Amino acid sequence: MAKAIQEIKKELEQASWEQRKVLLEEYRNDTRKGVQNLILQYRKRAKALFLELERLESMRVFEKKYSPQYVQICGIDEAGRGPLAGPVVAGACILPEDAQILYLNDSKKLSAKKRELLYDEICEKAVAYSVGMASPQRIDEINILQATYEAMQQAIAGLSVTPDLLLVDAVRIPSVPMKQVGIIQGDAKSVSIAAASILAKVTRDRMMEELDDVYPEYGFAKHKGYGSAMHIEAIRKYGPSPIHRRTFIKNFVEGKE
C-alpha cells in the first residue's frame, strides 16, 4: 500500500540533504499530484540552496586568496557614518575557514529580522568577534572619518584572537600593525566583511532602539538616527538631544541651541 502524502511530506522534512535526494528519486514515479508537487517543491529548494552556496563561495575569493599566507583573516566594517544622531559602530570578525552561514551578505541588503538571526549565528560560529564605537561627541570633536577609524581600532583591539590580516571595506585604518587589504564594496564581496557589517549594524540598531526610550520625541527606533523627514522635523521642533551630532545638524537647529 502506498504511503500517505502527509507521511511522505514528514519523511522529506526530517531527512538530511543526502537522504532527501534518495527519497525524491524513490518517489519520482508516484503519479499522485500531491507527491509530484512535493517533489517539485523540494527540487526548487535544492536549486535555491545550490545557488546560495555558489554565491557564498564567490564571497570567499579574498579569504581564499590570502589564506595560504595568513591564518586569522579578519573582516572590518562600520555602521552609522551618515546618521544625524548616535555613535558610529565598527565590527571586526574572524570566521573559521569552513564556516557556512547561509544568506550572509552586506547588512544593507538584509531585512532587520534576517540581520538579527545572522548576528546570533555569526557570534556562535566566529573564531573571534568584537565591536568598537565612537560617540557623537567624539565625532564632533575629530570628524566622522577619524571617529570611524577609532571605532575600527577599538574593534580590532577587542578581539580575543590577534588577526594576521585585515580585510577592510574601502578604507585603510591608520595605526594598526597588521597588513590590510581594502576592498571596494567589500561587505558584498567578502564573507568576513559581511559578517563584520552585520555585527556593527545590529549593535548600533539595538542601541538606537534603547535610546528611543530615553528620547521618545525623536523616533530613533524608526529611523535609527538617519535624516528622515520625521527626524528633521523633530530636531526643528525640540532642538538637539545629547546624542545628536552637532556638526551634522547645523542647518536644522538655528535658535534651538
Image (cartoon, rainbow, N blue to C red):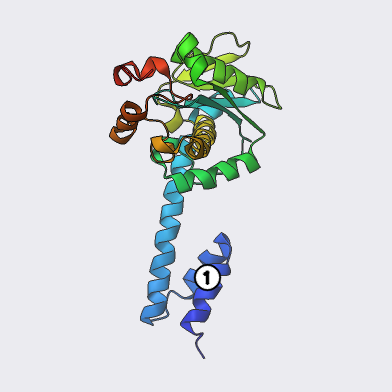
Between 249 and 174, the one lying in front of the other is 249
150 vs 59, left or right, is right
x then y, percent, for residue 79: 47, 28
Count of labels shown? 1
- Residue 153 lies left or right of residue 197; in this view the side is right
| Residue bearing the label numbered 1 | 12
Seen in the picture, residue 199 relative to 44 is either above or below; the reply is above
| Residue 145 can be seen in this image | yes
Q: Residue at x 41, y 17 (%)?
A: 246
Closest to the observer, 224 or 77: 224
Q: Position of residue 256 (x, y in %)?
A: 35, 20
- The local crowd at label 1, few if under 14, some if 14 to 19, many if 20 or more residues have their Cα within 10 Å, is many
* Among the 4 quarters of the image, the one containing residue 177: top right
In the image, residue 250 lies at what x, y percent?
33, 16
Whether residue 69 is visible here, answered yes or no, is no
Residue in view at x 45 percent, y 30 percent: 187
Q: Residue at x 39, y 24 (%)?
A: 84
**In which quadrant will I find the C terminus?**
top left
Most extreme residue toward the bottom is: 1
Left or right of 242 on screen, residue 36 = left
Label 1: element kind: helix
Give residue 236's position: percent from left, percent from top: 31, 26
Q: Which amino acid type is marked by label 1?
A: Leu
| Vertical relation: 144 (above or below) 4 | above
Q: Going 49% across and 34% down the picture, which residue do you hit?
A: 201
